[in-house]
Structure formats: C-alpha cells, structure tokens
Image (cartoon, rainbow, N blue to C red):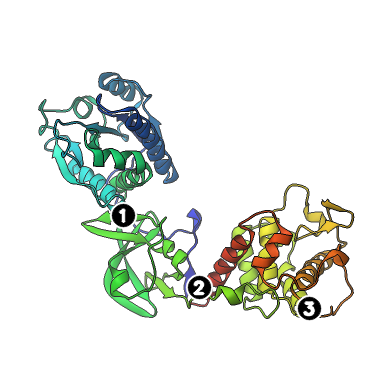
C-alpha cells in the first residue's frame, strides 16, 4: 500500500534518528566588521532575522543577542541565559586590504572534532544555497591572528564563529546584500544537522527501485539531486525546493518535486519513497467550463478534508452535489468545485458570506452586487453556481428551472474558459491563475492516490 505524503508536519515519515545532541536553544549574534558600510549592516540585521525565522520554523527556540553589543557583552548576555543543551553562533564578516579576498569560513574550538564537523556542515549547507561562493573551509580558532577567538573560548556552551564573506570584496558584498534569504536557509539547514542525523531510505521512480539511497531528516525524505538527470525526469528544480548536503552529496526534498509534476508516495512495508512522473497537464483543455470532469468523488472529498478537516462535517454531500448538478447541465465539475474552494476558502467562509447562506460562489442578490445571495439548501446553492457558469460559458438551454440570481443580466456564452470568466467574476488579476493552480493540485492529488 502506498500512502500519499502530506505537506503537514503531523504526516511526516517516521524515522529512527541517532541524536548527536538535542539542542534546546540557539543563540544568534551578528557582528559585521567595523569597515562594513550601511547596506552590509542592514543586510546583517535582515540575515539574523531570517536565520531566526528559518530555525523557528524547524522547531528550534532562538534567542537573538541584542544588536550593538560588543563581543564581551554578547558573551556575557549569552552566558546569563544559556544551559548545557544550548549552542551559540556568531555570524560576522571579514575585511582585508586586498579586495580579491573573499569567501566563507567557519571557526571552531581547536581540537574539538565534533565542533569541526558542525562547522563543515554549516559551510556545506550555505554553499548548497549559494553555490558560487568561495569555500575557505572549517578552521580551528587557533588559525587566527590572535591565536583564539573569545566568542568560542569564553562562551560556556558550544560556539562557532561563521564568517560570511569579506565586506571589502565587491562580489561578497553583493551576495550578502542580495542573498540574505539563501544564506539564512543554508545556515538553518546546517544548524539543523547538528542534532539530527540523516537515516537512509529507498527510492522508487516510475516503478523501478534504484540502488542509490536517499535520506530522511526530521521526517522529510530527500533524493540525491544528481539522480534527477540520471533518471531522465523531465522537470526543472522548483525555486523554493529545500536542499541539504550530507557527506558531500546534495539532496532535494522529495515533496518539493510536486511543484514539477511528480507524485510522491510512501511504501511503509518496503521503507521506500515512491515517485511517479505525471503526464503533462493541458491547461488549454482544463480551463474549459463546459465538458466532462476527471476527478472522482473520493478525490474531491479527500482533498477538501486534507485542507479543511471541518468542511465535510458541515457539508457532507458537497462533492456528490457538485458532480450531480454539473452533470445535469454539462458543466465541468472539476472547474466548478475548484472555484468553490477558492471562493469559500475551502469552505471556511468568512466576511459577509456565512455557511448558512449556502452560497458557494459569491453570488450576489438582484439589485445589489454587494449583498450575497441566500439559498434554501445546499443543493440549490450548488445548482445556482453551476447555472451561473453555464450562463457565462454556453448558449445551450438549461435542463432545470433557473435558480441563479441575476441570470437576466448575463450575456450568454461570453466566457467559455476560466481565463475569460475572471474579468466578469472577480477583480483579482490572478483569479484564473489561482483556480487553475488549485485544479492542477487536485489532478496531482488524484494521480498520487492511484499509486
């Protein structure tokens, strides 16, 4: 049995992890060199905020050292609050008389091999996100002009000093100012690896299992990124895909491949992540309002349940009703149901439209475009929505009595596609794009459920 992988944390894969250290808190201190200009200093404030945000999203407690403190003050601030299970990270820039000097380095307490490995992980993860940067390596703090670094030696918890480029290098300045988000993701991924050891996992692609292993980190499966070309998967790497590097191998998070049309499943018996490439979607055909649909009742209900667990409690027959009413009038139920999802925020409603109105498409009353219509029951509300779509998309006669308001004001057949409907239906310039994007997710969801 193959189960669909969910984006939610509660549905992450189970994995056996060997804990190297369970980190309780992460202390962040940023200190650009005194020669840094104002854009660099502003970028460092942004960088610290984004690193903190990324770490918190991964479940870490983050304490940010107040800006403006000197090293000795920052160390004292940390030591007053730190416990043995915490770690500290100082992020700084370097400066040099030669403007060609550039790159990143991570300094650790000399002789501590565990800290050396952590320094290396930081660099690897940053270079994964900023691949054109120069790697100056992980270096003991004795490899400095002063023979040691106070931040590392005087902090009572494990500490690393990360140098993210030279403020005196034009190339490094550009990366720091423009690439704070990518740098932050790399730093957060590196810190995450300090307490989480990847465990191996199998991968199956289009029915074939490969000898090459992936890894699981904190319940997320990662695929070796170089495997994508070897497998001839015709996709582009999603821009927002999460990457990590372990033992000099770069991995991409499996569920991020969904954005490129890859269905992702999990076979718990064989401990295998199952990937299947979807057939390309023809948006020119998908956007036609009139025609047959392809989504099943179970798919519609399961997708709605996943996005709003309370929706089917309030409207248990909503999927069946859309399929039935759309079939009667020849409207594509996939389009109609997806539009209802967008208009009702997955049947959460809100604002002027309340669930008791049985209005699933923001239909207005006659005489007032701002007053939402009320329907006596759920089926009538669905029927009114279907009829409105048919009125805009077709000149064909209706099979049932007209219940949609404002029908006589509609010019029949002027919008056979969703892209044409948006100008009459919504002020949102991305209205059709949102509907088609959600529709694509529904087709992908059904494809994955069939694995």
Instruction: State the residue in front, 367 or 320.
Output: 367
Quarter of the view holding residue 158: top left
Please give the name of the residue rendered at 69% of the width and 54% of the height, measured from the top-left corner. Answer: 427
Secondary structure beneath disc 3? helix
User: Circle 1: is it few (<14), some (14-19), or many (20+) Cα within 10 Å?
Assistant: many
Secondary structure beneath disc 2? helix
10 versus 76 height, above or below: below
Residue where numbered disc 2 is placed: 448
User: Circle 2: is it few (<14), some (14-19), or many (20+) Cα within 10 Å?
Assistant: many
Residue where numbered disc 1 is placed: 244
Report x, y in % for residue 220. 39, 58
Please give the name of the residue rendered at 86% of the width and 62% of the height, measured from the top-left corner. Answer: 406
Circle 1 or circle 3, nearest the eye: 3
Report x, y in % for residue 128. 28, 53
Please give the name of the residue rendered at 52% of the width and 77% of the height, measured from the top-left corner. Answer: 450
Secondary structure beneath disc 1? strand
Circle 3 or circle 2, nearest the eye: 3
Residue where numbered disc 3 is placed: 329
């Amino acid at each position: 049995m193959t189960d669909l992988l969910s984006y939610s944390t509660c549905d992450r894969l189970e994995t056996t992890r060997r804990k190297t250290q369970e980190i309780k808190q992460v202390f962040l201190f940023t200190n650009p060199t005194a020669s840094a200009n104002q854009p660099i200093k502003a970028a460092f404030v942004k960088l610290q905020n984004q690193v903190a945000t990324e770490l918190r999203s991964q479940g870490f407690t983050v304490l940010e050292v107040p800006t403006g403190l000197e090293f000795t003050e920052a160390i004292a601030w940390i030591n007053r609050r730190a416990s043995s299970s915490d770690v500290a990270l100082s992020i700084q820039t370097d400066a040099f008389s030669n403007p060609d000097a550039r790159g990143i380095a991570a300094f650790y307490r000399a002789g501590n091999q565990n800290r050396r490995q952590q320094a290396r992980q930081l660099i690897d993860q940053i270079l994964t996100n900023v691949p054109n940067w120069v790697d100056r390596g992980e270096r003991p703090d004795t490899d400095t002009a002063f023979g040691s670094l106070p931040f590392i030696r005087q902090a009572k918890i494990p500490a690393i000093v990360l140098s993210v480029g030279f403020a005196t290098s034009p190339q490094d300045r550009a990366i720091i100012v423009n690439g704070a988000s990518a740098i932050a993701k790399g730093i957060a991924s590196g810190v995450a690896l300090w307490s989480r050891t990847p465990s191996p996992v199998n991968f199956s692609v289009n029915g074939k299992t490969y000898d090459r292993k992936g890894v699981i980190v904190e319940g997320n499966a990662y695929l070796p990124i170089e495997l994508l070309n070897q497998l001839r998967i015709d996709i582009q790497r999603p821009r927002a895909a999460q990457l990590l590097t372990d033992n000099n191998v770069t991995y991409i998070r499996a569920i991020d491949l969904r954005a490129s049309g890859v269905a992702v499943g999990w076979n718990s018996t064989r401990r295998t992540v199952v990937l299947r490439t979807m057939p390309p979607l023809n948006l020119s055909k998908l956007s036609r309002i009139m025609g047959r649909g392809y989504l099943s009742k179970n798919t519609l209900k399961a997708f709605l349940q996943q996005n709003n667990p309370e929706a089917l409690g309030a409207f248990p027959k909503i999927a069946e009703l859309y399929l039935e009413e759309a079939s009667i009038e020849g409207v594509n139920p996939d389009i109609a149901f997806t539009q209802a999802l967008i208009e009702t925020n997955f049947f959460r409603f809100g604002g002027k439209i309340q669930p008791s109105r049985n209005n699933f498409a923001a239909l207005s009353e006659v005489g007032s475009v701002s007053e939402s219509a009320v329907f006596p029951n759920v089926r009538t509300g669905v029927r009114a929505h279907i009829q409105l779509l048919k009125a805009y998309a077709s000149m064909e006669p209706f099979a049932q009595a007209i219940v949609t308001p404002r029908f006589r004001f509609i010019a029949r057949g002027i919008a056979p596609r969703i892209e044409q409907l948006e100008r009459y239906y919504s002020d949102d310039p991305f209205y059709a794009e949102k509907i088609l994007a959600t529709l694509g997710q529904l087709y992908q969801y059904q494809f994955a459920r069939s694995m």
